[in-house]
Amino acid sequence: MTTLKRTLGETARRAVAARTEALFRASGALREGHFTLKSGRHSDAYLEKFQVLQDPAATSELSNTGLWRTLRPVIDDGHCNRCSWVCSTLCPDSAIHVDADHRPRIDYDHCKGCMVCVAVCPRHAIRAVSEREAGRTFEGAMR
């Protein structure tokens, strides 16, 4: 069992490393060439981490960015007309995903609570709820 866990852990680490490298490459943050580092050493690659931070979707994927949110958007499925493209397209953090039934689902690990979705929802089916209230009333309901 220990060998299996170790193998699965290593496989998962490799998958995360490959995805992280892909995100850095896509954003232009992984630079290749010849670089003289501040230490005086030389390298054939350089990570310009601030370059990847300019891409909200990559930033959200690389880290859980919803930790500082004070308000949480909550979708009322009874009022939602399943247009789904409005909230999911305009979310600056790509934290709203649409399921097979065209229902928008909010990824609270990455939602920063900007409330753009609340402002743009044509049916006003998304409302802002304080994190305190959400913790008591809506705990895990939208995950």
Image: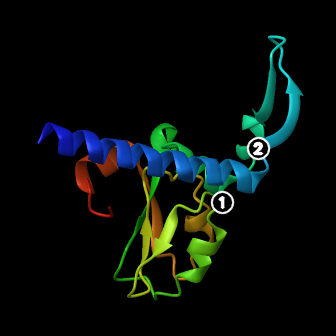
Residue 92 marker: 1
Residue drawn at 81 percent across, 42 percent down: 31
- Marks 1 and 2, how far apart at CA: 20 Å
Q: Is residue 25 left or right of residue 120?
A: right
Point out residue 112 in the picture as x, y percentages from the top left corner: 55, 48
Q: Quadrant of the C terminus?
A: bottom left
Nearest to the observer: residue 30 or residue 45: 45
Residue 91 vs 6, above or below: the answer is below
Q: Residues within 10 Å of mark 1 (few under 14, many from 20)?
A: some
The amino acid marked with disc number 1 is Pro
Nearest to the observer: residue 5 or residue 75: 5
Point out residue 39 in the picture as x, y percentages from the top left corner: 80, 11
Mark 1 or 2, closer to the camera:
2
Reading the chain from its start, which is encountered first: label 1 or label 2?
A: 2
Q: Quadrant of the N terminus?
A: top left
Residue 29 marker: 2
Nearest to the observer: residue 104 or residue 48: 48
* Residue 71 in view here: no
Residue 122 vs 50, above or below: the answer is below
Q: Is residue 8 left or right of residue 48?
A: left
| Secondary structure under the numbered disc 2 in the rendered image | loop
Point out residue 131 in the picture as x, y percentages from the top left corner: 39, 45
Residue drawn at 46 percent across, 88 percent down: 81
Point out residue 38 in the picture as x, y percentages from the top left corner: 83, 14
